[in-house]
Every structure is written in C-alpha cells, then in structure tokens.
Amino acid sequence: MNRNNLPDLFKMKVTELQKLAKEMEITELSGLSKAELIQKIFEMKATQEGLAYVSGCLEVTDDGYGFLRFAENNYTHGRNDIYVSSSQIKKFGLKKGHVVSGPARAPKEDEKYFALIRVNSVNNDSPAKLKQIKQFDKLTPYYPEERLNLETDPKDMSTRIINLFTPIGKGQRGLIVAAPRTGKTVLMQKIANAILTNHSEVYVIVLLVDERPEEVTEMRRILLPNNSEVISSTFDETPRNHIQVATMALEKAKRMVELGKDVVIMLDSITRLARAYNMTAPSSGKVLSGGIDSNSLHKPKKFFGAARNTLEKGSLTILATALV
C-alpha cells in the first residue's frame, strides 16, 4: 500500500493513520475519527503543495461541469464557489448533492473561479466506491421499521404526546398542520433536538423556506450543533432561490441515504415551497382554488414523496409544516 497515494488512506487502520499524521507533524489527534484523521492528512498534503483544501456540496450544471457550493451560502451561488471539471464528474460518477473534498488551485488569468485539482473523498469516503453504490431511485422503498424517540424532558408534554399518538419512524412522511402563530416552528425545534439527543446516527437538515431572517438565526441558535445543519432561503430571496436551496438540501440527503445514512429533513414550510413552484412554473391554464396552477403541485409532492425507508441502505424522513 502506497501511503503517498491518497485514495489508499481509506484502506489504512486508525493506528496507521495516526502514525502517518505524526510523521507529517499534525497535532491534536486525540479523539479524531478515521474520517477526521484522513481529512487532516488531506489538508496538510494540500498545504505542503501550496494549495487550498476545500470541501463542498456539488451542483452539476446542464453542460456537465459543476461547482462546489457551501453551507455558508445555503448551497447557492457565491464568489467562493469551486469549479469542478466535467472529466472529474464523469470519472467518478459524481452527482448533485455529493460532498466532495480535495485540493483547489487559484484561478488563472482568464478564469473566474478556483478549480478543484483532484477528488480526494466523497462524503468522507473513497471516490472509487461510488461506482458500487445503488442510486436512490433504485433502492427498494419499505415501511418504517425503526421508531424515532422524541422524548427528552419529562416536563415537555408536546413530544410525549407525539410519541404516544402519532409515533414517527425512520423513513416516514409527516405534516404539521396548524394555523399561523400557533407554535409549529417551536414544535419543529423540539422534535429536531429530541432526534439529535436520542439518535446520534441520524443527520438532521432543517430547511427554512420563505422565512424571516431572525427566525433562521433563532433556529441556528437553538438547534444542537452535532450532526445537523440549517439551510435557509429567506422571504427577501426570489422563488427560484427557494427552489434551488430546497433541491440542494434534498439531493444532499439522497446521497447520504445511498451510503446507508439515516437522514431527517424538517421543512418549514411546504406551503411556501409550493407557492415558489407555482410562481416559477409555466401556466397550464388549469387553476385550482387559491390561485395555484395544477402543474405546480407535482414537484412539491415529489419532494415530499422522496421520504422512504429502504431495504438496502438508509432512510429519509421528511417532516413538513403546512399553513391553513
């Protein structure tokens, strides 16, 4: 095994990685997992080569090339995006939503973006394994088999009542339907933190669409930081931005499920996401009650229908609020 060949790092044991990291004069190794050790080695290798080490969520364009988008920009276009060539995407079979890591070089005179030089890892694993992974749409959907425990504080009645009367399983779809200002968002915060507390194996994505900026800040402040993230498109953004953010969040979740992860998306709200689709969809001439075009409801239903438990890999659970 060649230790200078970066893909071989994934085949090494943790003790071997720790020894290699010490040889490269990497400090603060205690408590690091195998994936974290590999990332530290990647970062040091890039620094020694005079490059920047980057990690971002891939968005593939219609022309075949792509860009790494970052959580700081809610996975939308930003000045710090990293260009990924079509040859790298074809070589490893990369798809939208993959978290790609590797060294990047500065743009040349006629270039606008930093460019990814090589793909070191995909979702903290070897990129060579992607060809063996079954696509999300080809996984076998099945009924939820494992329950999500939502009880943490004995004094909190809301999550206790959900556990008793409407239990939620991994791979389930759920709607929280209530009038405005009745505490839907607060209930979502409690459910998210309960899942993070009781299920360390679950990754939680809180997706806020058409919300106020202060509500986004509040959610980020309250949500437990481990194994979670808040992705948002506030009310001052365009409907197309709402759709792009929601699409990237869903695609990222799908890629994680393909690797055997359990993911929960908490969407606030599916009503506002449907409105965004309605404003961008071409008119079909068939208008439903409330001024909603009949064609615009297909994509929100597809988003919601993506939730499923799978026989082969992980599960995707979607809990969404709906306005009445």
Image (tube, helix red, strand yellow):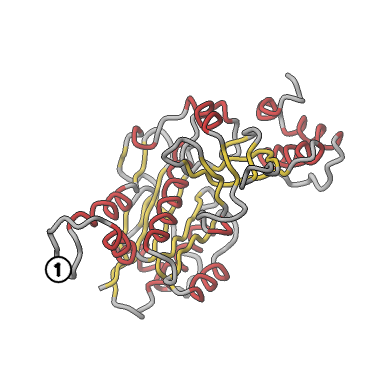
Q: Position of residue 217 (x, y in %)?
A: 54, 72
Residue at the extreme front: 110
Residue occupying the point 37% across, 35% down? 311
Instruction: Out of 124 and 166, give the one closest to the viewer.
Output: 124
Disc 1 secondary structure class: loop
Instruction: Out of 314 and 138, give the one closest to the viewer.
Output: 138
Q: Is residue 92 above or below residue 166?
A: above
**184 displayed left or right of 230:** left
Residue at the extreme left: 286
* Amino acid type indicated by mark 1: Ser
Residue of label 1: 289
Instruction: Out of 288 and 225, give the one closest to the viewer.
Output: 288
Residue at the extreme bottom: 181
Q: Is residue 157 above or below residue 14?
A: below
Q: Position of residue 204 (x, y in %)?
A: 49, 55
Quadrant containing the N terminus is top right
Q: Position of residue 278 (x, y in %)?
A: 26, 61
Quadrant containing the C terminus is bottom left
Residue occupying the point 60% across, 55% down? 79
Residue occupying the point 86% across, 34% down? 23
Classify residue 85 by image quadrant: top right
Q: Is residue 112 above or below residue 241?
A: above
Q: Position of residue 6 (x, y in %)?
A: 70, 28
